[in-house]
Image: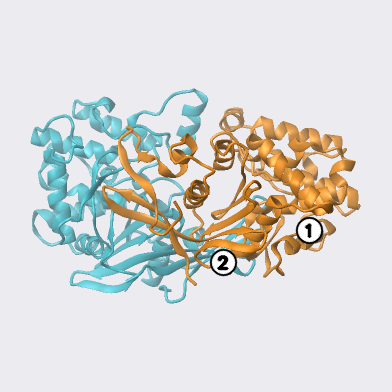
Chain colours: A cyan, B orange
């Protein structure tokens, strides 16, 4: 099955661009609604950080290190690299007796405006703490310390990544079709869009036992700290806030978005085939509206989907629309 | 006809994302090769600035104002807002007895790294000279002074925009399907991908007379000043340089790219349906390789299409590929 038309960009009354993709809404029993091809194989990229964090909690490593909900939220985050993020990751590493040099995520300039400006104007290079994945990597290091593995924790055959792979295959209910190296150098395992939605439905319906407890704690941490999961102005943060704590949301590179909706018992996974963040953000907003978790006229909905587009002089130029047949 | 698969993004041996689009290569007699739907209606956005500049030259306004090839290149540019761009636009306006305040393009932060840093660190707001379209608007103001129109030269019924519409419909060979407000507030007229390619083929095969002379001068100006048409590191600039002056290339927002290839007598127009610049840049590089104007292993080709993708630690993560059936 081919990708479905999901999001359209209109200008001057004409369709200018469009995003196609695959989208699955699942409950504990499987697919509830789907657009495009649920069997489409994707890389979840950063959207699966809560899955990558399961071994951290389930192994007891998180408790042994005394991690609180802020650290768990950061482990699931693609953060802006603002000081609210970097200071917490730095303190976390320090408490482990580790430092920024132990990270293997690499460095990039932070999206956080103030921190970006501070680095730019002081001609300071960003460090690995600024990497949007530094919280996930601090989680990997915490697990690694617990397991006693080697320093190169992002290698595919390292115990940390093998534990991640096992958890990933269990919650997606699939043997991974393959893996690639992510932007942060960690392995990223492929799965179907349906598998990713199934995994999110699992987080939305946590059972008893170690797995359910870990899922519950990670979801609660994300919902409690939306500003740590991404940052001011970002879709994850603003849409989580707008749902009033009824959704844990997470973006991934190349236009993946997932949602965990505990009080509806639903999981959502979507991939825009062209890799455009614009399309993925609009599509997750559309799903939240469809499921009654987001008001069409709210500031967050208008920002990512329903508002009019304007230019540098504030003139209205067009709008985003849900394609015909897409949820509303 | 639907959009054709053109560019793929691979990671870990799996297809991660893909770009579909419409692409036409035309000569003076019409379509030579096409992918997707040549009749697809698009907004050319900034890719048609050389068309929007025709009335400036044909009216005699450019000569009356003593414009040289630098100004003509800037009129066709989506520049980085570096000082090599802003200083020239400012001097041009000054020679007309006008200033930045007469522009109607609005302001945005420049892409040029040094100028962006200067503004950021001095807490200075960008001005309209920094707008990537300020050269085109200086051209509009030059034409407007010649025509004696009102100050609001971006209104759809203003003589400047009516002259642009007439030229646009003549060179595309189509009655425009509609218009929208562009990012810079100027009207942008819609046409088919075939019509845009036909227009570019016209620029590649300029006839005698006023139009042909204007086309020749604009193309020569673009080719003579690739750094003014965009800026260091940008696809237009780097790919024009890599073809050694055998192509005038121009990008447009929402993933449009055009090429004027005088010594082959060909025009190219392409639109990636999802609006992704990544896809458009890769596709125009693929066309240039296909037509023998760009070496697959050149730095510019590797940068925009044929090179491997790497992450923040320099690890290879994947690659872009031309989809099956796409030119090579």
Q: Nearer the viewer, residue A96 or A168?
A: A168
Instruction: Evaluate whether residue B261 shows in this view.
Output: yes
Q: Does B18 sit left or right of B212 as displayed?
A: left
Secondary structure state at the residue bearing disc 2: loop
Q: Which quadrant holds residue B38? A: bottom right
Q: In what quadrant of the picture does the N terminus of chain A appear?
A: bottom left
Q: Are there few (<14), some (14-19), or many (20+) residues within 10 Å of tag 1?
A: many
Name the residue carrying label 1: B161
Q: Residue B89 at what x, y percent from top left?
A: 75, 37
Q: Does A38 sit left or right of A277 as displayed?
A: left
Q: Are there few (<14), some (14-19), or many (20+) residues within 10 Å of tag 2?
A: many
Q: Residue B163 at what x, y percent from top left?
A: 81, 59
Q: Could you confirm whether marks 1 and 2 are on the same chain? A: yes
**Label 1: chain?**
B
Q: Residue A236 at what x, y percent from top left?
A: 38, 53
Residue A108 marker: none
Residue B31, placed above or below residue B149: below
**Label 2: chain?**
B
Residue at (46%, 56%) from the top-left corner?
A278
Residue B128, placed above or below residue A36: above
Residue at (9%, 36%) from the top-left corner?
A147
Nearer the observer: mark 1 or 2; the answer is: 2
Q: Which quadrant holds residue A72? A: top left
Structural distance between the alpha carbons of marks 1 and 2: 26 Å
Q: In what quadrant of the picture does the C terminus of chain A appear?
A: bottom left
Q: Residue B237 at what x, y percent from top left?
A: 59, 38
Secondary structure state at the residue bearing disc 1: helix
Name the residue carrying label 2: B38
């Amino acid at each position: 099955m081919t990708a479905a038309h999901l999001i359209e960009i209109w200008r001057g009354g004409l369709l200018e661009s469009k995003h196609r993709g695959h989208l699955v809404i699942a409950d504990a029993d499987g697919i509830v609604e789907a657009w495009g091809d649920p069997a489409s194989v994707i890389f979840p990229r950063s959207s699966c950080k809560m899955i990558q964090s399961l071994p951290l909690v389930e192994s007891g490593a998180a408790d042994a290190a005394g991690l609180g909900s802020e650290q768990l939220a950061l482990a699931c985050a693609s953060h802006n690299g603002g000081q609210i993020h970097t200071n917490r990751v730095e303190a976390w590493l320090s408490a482990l007796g580790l430092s920024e040099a132990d990270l293997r995520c690499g460095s990039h300039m932070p999206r956080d405006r103030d921190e970006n400006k501070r680095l730019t104007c002081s001609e300071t290079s960003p460090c690995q703490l600024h990497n949007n994945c530094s919280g996930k990597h601090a989680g990997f290091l915490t697990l690694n310390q617990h397991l006693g593995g080697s320093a190169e924790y992002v290698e595919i055959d390292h115990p940390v990544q093998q534990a991640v792979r096992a958890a990933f295959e269990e919650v997606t209910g699939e043997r991974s079709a393959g893996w690639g190296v992510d932007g942060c150098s960690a392995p990223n395992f492929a799965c179907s869009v349906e598998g990713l939605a199934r995994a999110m439905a699992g987080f939305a319906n946590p059972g008893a036992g170690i797995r359910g407890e870990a899922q519950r704690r990670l979801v609660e941490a994300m919902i409690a700290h939306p500003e740590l999961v991404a940052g001011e102005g970002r879709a994850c943060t603003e849409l989580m806030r707008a749902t009033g704590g009824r959704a844990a949301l997470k973006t991934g590179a190349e236009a993946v978005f997932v949602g965990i909706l505990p009080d509806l018992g639903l999981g959502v996974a979507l991939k825009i085939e062209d890799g455009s963040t614009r399309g993925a953000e609009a599509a997750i907003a559309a799903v939240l509206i469809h499921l009654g978790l987001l008001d069409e006229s709210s500031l967050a909905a208008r920002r990512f989907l329903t508002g009019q587009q304007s230019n540098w002089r504030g003139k209205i130029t067009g709008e985003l629309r849900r394609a015909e047949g897409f949820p509303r």
